[in-house]
Amino acid sequence: QVFEEILQTNLKRLSNGLLPKYSGFPSNYDAADAPLLVFSAIQELKAFKEKKKLWALYGPAMKEILANYKKGTLFNIHMQEDGLIYAKQEGVALTWMDAYIDGKPVTQRGGLNVEINAAWYNAVCFALELAEASKDKDFINEWKDYPLIISSSFLERFWSDEKGYLADYVDGDFVDWSVRPNMIIAASFEYSPLSREQKKMVVSIAKNELLTTKGLRTLSPDNPLYKGTFEDSADNRSEAAHQGSVYPFLIQPFVKTYLEIHKMGGLSFVKQIIEGFEEEMSENCVSTLSEVYEGNPP
């Protein structure tokens, strides 16, 4: 009940298919990922509500989000001819990696983002699942061809057989192959363009280069831009925030994808990860975790 109240409260703030990060001011709608993550939130309700009921309750908001991304909305967020979502406006960080120094993004990641496009694919597929259960023929006819178009373009633009993982973002001819947790977020959605083998390779890279006892690093220590400490001035902390610092929330997509691949065989490893947080919950603010940790041990 509380989950749905939070969801419905936020959906009332929808504007041009976007959601605000803080309050309802126009400048706060600069999150290209947030509206697409609404679809993941609604997916969590499938265990409690029939698909027809979900489409009746949330279909209008889902349609509004998809329509705006397709035709184009604020901050130059729009669907390209190849079905992928392009999001770039100079001076604005449109993803969750939104630290700034002197008003400039530290990690702008402008263009085609891997996690946003994976969330886009999941959103379209899930909306079609609910529409088909509800026999919404107009919606089905408009969107039925897009999953194949999006998945094909996604693999073409982001996947490398040679490297064995996903690019972080693509902008024109530029491809950023930085090892970041966004590839794990991309692999974790219910609907994914990735094969099981591709997911396995992504998880392996993340486990070897990003996984710590406190969550996943935001950048591999092998990257020359890596910042392993989170201290001193506000600018220093902003610089490190998404260039190596660790976030506990990233454990969720990692564990979800790891268990999808390894199933029961992965339980002991996942249990070990979760138990690693127990000591932390008795320190600082008791029974909570910090938002961010340093990338360097301990």
Image (spheres, grey):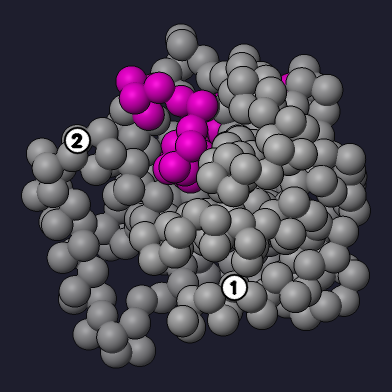
Q: Secondary structure at mark 2?
A: helix
Magenta residues, start to end: 174-199
Mark 1 — residue?
7
Let me know if residue 17 appears in the view: yes
Q: Nearer the viewer, residue 278 or 106?
A: 278
Quadrant in which residue 100 is drawn: bottom right
Q: Name the residue at the bottom extreme.
A: 286
Q: Which residue is mark 2?
A: 262
Q: Residue at x 40, y 22 (%)?
A: 195
Q: Which element carries disc 1, helix, strand or loop?
A: helix
> Which one is earlier in the sequence, the residue at label 2 or at label 1?
1
**Amino acid type of the residue tagged 2 in the rendering:** His
Q: Is residue 220 left or right of residue 91?
A: left
CB under 8 Å between discs 2 and 1: no
Q: Residue at x 50, y 54 (%)?
A: 51
Vertical placement of residue 198 versus 77, above or below = above
Residue 87 falls left or right of residue 36: right
Give the residue at x 56% y 81%.
Answer: 5
Q: Is residue 126 visible from the viewing direction of this image?
A: no
Amino acid of disc 1 = Leu
Where residue 20 appears, x then y in whole percent? 76, 70
Residue at 57% across / 19% down in the picture? 155
